[in-house]
Image (tube, rainbow, N blue to C red):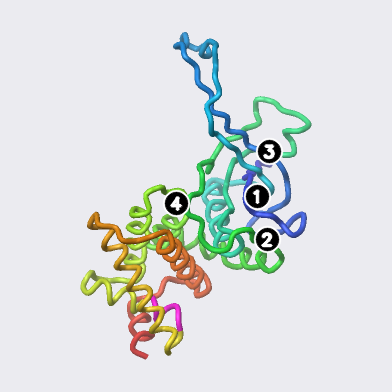
Amino acid sequence: MTELYVGLAGLPLDQDEFDLGERIVIRKTYAHLMMPIVMAFKPALAGQPHPAPWRAVQGGGGHDIIAELRVKDAQMGDLERCHVYASVLRLWSNPATTMIVTSTRSLADFVESYDETFQLIPMQVQERLHPYGVEGGSLNEIGAAYVKSYAPVAYKLWKESAEFKLALDALNSSQYQQNTALILVSLWAAFEALFLGDRSELRFRVSSYMASYLEKYGPERAKRQKRIAELYDKRSAAVHGLPTHNSDDVVATLNLMRDVLMMILTGGAIPTREELQKELLG
């Protein structure tokens, strides 16, 4: 039976193992991915390593893998499914959840034995620059139940809805993007895809639709609409090459996307234009 394993960093577990459904379990493990950077100074011959001397370069770093996803009876597309499950773990439990390596064997198997059929493939090893949400959260029974309920919904939407896929992928990639203006541009492109049928009166329409989707009618909705409109102004300035945003604006926009995605998962569908207009107009 073929199995797929994905080593995760940044997500402590409150117990040894949780069943996440859909043939996926998450369990405790430990491994450390070392990333030394080494330079050689002479060209290599064909098929040969670079000759000495080798010298270490400052930097590099590494990742502690403290959990792994195990996919039983792995099938085509299960690595994509793991990407979506990891995304839901970021939304609910801890945005630091990072897919470090994928393997055909459990990481514990590498301690006792190893042969050429074992595979370890690196994945998200770059530095996270713009974390959102609350760091340090662990996965408990409530979080595991949330993932078990809503990760299949997320995977279905990710496969069937280009708008949802754009939004989820934009949120995931933004934590690693160095240019904050590009973060705002990509996130707001995803917001517009989710909430706008046309492109007239963008600022007011998108902020009003989003506020009515996230908040019940009343003062909190008005406050939310105002803040969303302010964040949209930061996006517009970035698009036109005159950025006015700061790190708080970037984090606020990341968290806004998190709120929207979690609301979509709770409802099981992307809101239609008719539903948004009805909610907006009461």
Magenta includes 174?
no
Tell which circle, 4 or 1, labels the residue nearer the N-terminal end.
Answer: 1
Q: Amino acid at mark 4?
A: Ser
Q: Which residue is mark 1?
A: 69
Q: How many neighbours does mark 1 have within 10 angstroms: few (below 14), some (14-19), or many (20 or more)?
A: many
Q: Residue at x 62, y 51 (%)?
A: 10
x and y percent of residue 191 in the render?
36, 66
Q: Does residue 70 lie above or below 38 as drawn? A: below
Question: For the residue labelled by badge 4, is the local secondary structure a helix, a strand or a loop?
Answer: helix
Q: Does residue 132 lie above or below 281 as drawn? A: above
Magenta includes 211?
yes
Instruction: State the separation of the CA atoms marked 2 and 4.
Output: 22 Å
Q: How many neighbours does mark 3 have within 10 angstroms: few (below 14), some (14-19), or many (20 or more)?
A: some
Say which mark, if any, is on residue 139. 2
Of 278 and 58, nearer the camera is: 58
Image-quadrant location for residue 204: bottom left
Q: Residue at x 59, y 59 (%)?
A: 135
Question: Which segment did they paint magenta?
Answer: 210-215
Say which mark, if any, is on residue 81. none
Tell which circle, 2 or 4, labels the residue nearer the N-terminal end.
Answer: 2
Q: Which residue is mark 4?
A: 173
Q: Which residue is mark 3?
A: 105
x and y percent of residue 192 in the render?
32, 66
Instruction: State the separation of the CA atoms marked 3 and 1.
Output: 11 Å
Q: How many neighbours does mark 4 have within 10 angstroms: few (below 14), some (14-19), or many (20 or more)?
A: some
Question: For the residue labelled by badge 3, is the local secondary structure a helix, a strand or a loop?
Answer: loop
Instruction: State the separation of the CA atoms marked 2 and 1.
Output: 13 Å
